[in-house]
Image (cartoon, coloured by chain):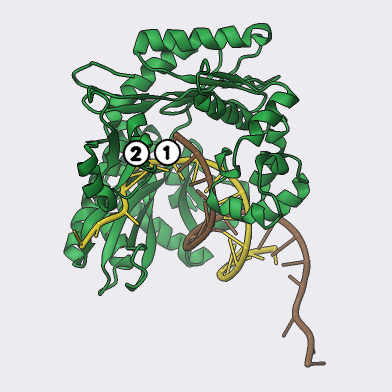
Chain colours: A green, B brown, C yellow
Amino acid sequence: MLIRSSQAQNYAKLGRVDLAKSVDNSSLGSECVVVTPHNGRPCIISNNDGCVIARSNEAKALGIAMGAPWHLHKAAFAKQGVVVRSSNYTLYGDLSARVMTILRGFAPDVEVYSIDEAFLDLAGFDDRLHSHALDMRRTVLQWTGIPVSVGIAPTKTLAKAANRTAKKQKGGDGVCILMTGPEQKAALSALALTDLWGVAGRLATRLEKLSITTPLQLRDADPQLVRQHLGVLGERLVLELRGIPCQRLVLSQAANKSIVASRSFGRPVTEKFELEQAVSAFTERAAEKLRRQGLAASVLQVFVTTNPFKPQERQYAASRTVTLPVASADSTVLLRAARVALTSVWRDGYRYKKAGVMLLDLVPAAMVQGDLWTPADTPARQQLMEAVDVINRRYGRRSVSFAASGVKLGWMLRSEQRSSRFTTDWSELLQV
DNA sequence: TCTGGGGTCCTAGGACCC
DNA sequence: TCTGGGGTCCTAGGACCC
């Protein structure tokens, strides 16, 4: 598929659309690759010049694997005339939004699952699932130029399998419906364990030890046994494969629970000041994201690792978290916390490969109260700290703590944790 | 010589997804 | 010299409390 738009000078992978009917269950999925004017030349997208994260069909035909390390294949790619582009998530986000808007016209409930996937509730379309799916496909293609494939089934897990089947069908119409037992059996028997949603290498290995090597064997396995060995996720997987939904449609876009900024370094970092610079940059980037979403962070974590691909080198991985007295989105505050955390994880003599900053315990910034949020040492803050000292002397060290919980930000006495005593009225603290 | 049990919270780590 | 980045969820184990 070609997009002739001049701004789309690389290609975007977009649009597996899984539509799931949640109540009595059906589902739909699509995948498309949009390739810009490279006239049939193989094309890939890399992330940070590290890994291949998307491939055009021509590139797939060359045997270029998903996630292939870029540096190992650089020479071969050049020889084969592979066009390489960097990822452009702003562009993909824009295309994605257009597709999602169209999909909302085809079902009342749409879950935007990722940048290129959606689950739709198709309850009520039972007698015309196929024509509805074709209609949807046609419209998305006409209006955006993006081909999508559709998988329909009683559960999300089966819908994903249906989607995969639809995508792989040679000469098919891009739609796969797995509503009946025989249909499901036929489709599942053509898949490998790791084709299933939620099963990657580690789980597959553990399943093999239970003599479960195919999706059908997993479906027919004892859920209790699977739960014992793989936990609750494994049990859910078995049930979903049997057509018993364990996952509802998620309609509301929940706020982020964490924000990360991280990078792998092009060459090993051995000097502390270099790492400090990087961590500062990560912190700024994460803080910007935080503010754009109208959030504040209560906890900041810094992590560093050496290169795990070089086992012959001494390995070290560490992370340190700093809890802020009050949730903040202020760069100065976050930078200070990041510096403290980094100093604590830093060890001389290692070749650092990757580092990052993670912001956690996010709360709406609007909930953070007045002076206590500002980085400066205000009189109110000094009063607060004195009060904390008094309380700690009376009740023991660290008996008062600050926390964000749900929509409330406040303090609590540890001894009263059970009663979850939160408040945003800081003066109460002074009276304890 | 014998050294509770149950609940909660926190953290680190593992596994998965796109 | 070179192997991504950004997320979520679950679990095990230790600390702590009663």
What type is the residue that disc 1 sits on?
Val
> Residue at point 72% right, 37% down?
A239
Q: Residue A288 at what x, y percent from top left?
A: 26, 38
> Residue at point 20% right, 66% down?
A272
> In the rendered image of this protein, does residue A151 appear above or below residue B8?
above
> In the rendered image of this protein, does residue A100 appear above or below residue A308?
above
Q: Give residue A104's mark.
A: none
Label 2 resides on the chain identified as A
Residue designated by label 2: A62
Query: In the figure, residue A61 lies in which quadrant?
Result: top left
> In the rendered image of this protein, does residue A397 appear above or below residue A62?
below
Cα distance, mark 1 to mark 2? 47 Å
- Callout 1 crowding tier (Cα within 10 Å): few <14, some 14–19, many ≥20: many
**Image-based side of A268 in relation to A144, left or right:** left
Quick check: do tags 1 and 2 share a chain? yes
Taking depth in this image into account, of A425 and A117 the one nearest to the observer is: A117
Please tell me whether mark 2 sits on a helix, a strand or a loop: loop
Residue designated by label 1: A363
Taking depth in this image into account, of A230 and A29 the one nearest to the observer is: A29
> In the rendered image of this protein, does residue A294 appear above or below residue A102?
below
Q: Earlier in the sequence, mark 1 or mark 2?
A: 2
Q: Is residue A106 visible?
A: no
> Residue at point 59% right, 31% down?
A161
Q: Is residue A411 visible?
A: yes
Q: Residue A374 at what x, y percent from top left?
A: 27, 44
Taking depth in this image into account, of A123 and A344 the one nearest to the observer is: A123
